[in-house]
Image: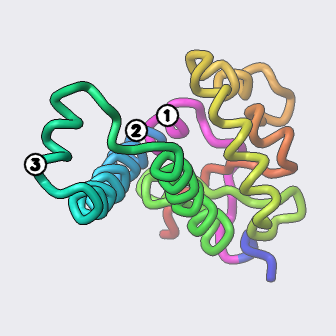
Amino acid sequence: MTAERNNKAVGPAPVWRRFAAILYDSFLVLAIMFLVGFINLGIQMQIYGSEELKAMTESGQSVGGPAFYIVLFLTIFSFFAFFWSRRGQTLGMQAWKLRILSEEGNYITLQQCLVRWFIAIPSLLLGGLGIFWSLWDKEGCSWQDRLSGTRTLYIPAKK
């Protein structure tokens, strides 16, 4: 199904809207991280007991471990992949009227989600350079758009 047929895109998403959606989604991701952290804490309490866990944290030991960080990473990726592949937009993107579609106008695949995710990390860590790139790109594409074969579009409200 072509996702774009129900919504007429004006064109590439403006940079300010992209950053507004990122800020909005970052609050949701932070809440997800807290939830995963609390679940991890509950599991660690069952394994070590509250007194030993308290002693571990007071001594500066991490109670996360590699498994916790892998689960956290996969949970955050799953959040984005679910929304991008099912609706073309996260909740932040919905609020700012943005949508991610494939170059053909369809919802994106899991593989495209994975590429977007891994490119978005350095794109943001480098001060948003990968997103600002869309200001100079002929088609208004960010790094993650260009490398994943997707487009981030501005879709105004229907009248």
Q: Residue at x 73, y 46 (%)?
A: 116
Q: Quadrant of the N terminus?
A: bottom right
Q: State which tag comes first along the sequence, 3 or 1.
A: 1
Q: Quadrant of residue 155?
A: bottom right
Q: Indicate the amino acid at tag 3.
A: Glu
Assign a secondary structure to mark 3.
helix
Name the spot of residue 121 as percent of width and height, x first.
63, 33
Name the spot of residue 118 as percent of width and height, x first.
71, 41
Q: Quadrant of residue 100?
A: bottom right
Assign a secondary structure to mark 2.
helix
Distance, label 3 to label 2, CA atoms, is 38 Å
Which region shows up in magenta?
6-21
For label 3, the residue is: 51
Q: Is residue 37 left or right of residue 25?
A: left
The crowd level at tag 2 (other Cα within 10 Å; few <14, some 14-19, many 20+) is few
Q: Is residue 13 left or right of residue 137?
A: left
Judge whether residue 9 is colored magenta: yes
Q: In terms of depth relative to the viewer, which is nearer, 100 or 52?
A: 52
Which numbered circle lies on residue 23? 2
Q: Quadrant of residue 107?
A: bottom right
* Labels 3 & 2 near each other (Cβ < 8 A): no
Considering only vertical position in the picture, is 120 above or below 68? above
Which numbered circle lies on residue 19? 1
* Labels 1 & 2 near each other (Cβ < 8 A): yes
Q: Is residue 58 left or right of residue 88?
A: left
Q: Nearer the viewer, mark 3 or mark 2?
A: 3
Q: Residue at x 51, y 59 (%)?
A: 75
Q: Indicate the amino acid at tag 2.
A: Leu
Judge whether residue 148 is colored magenta: no
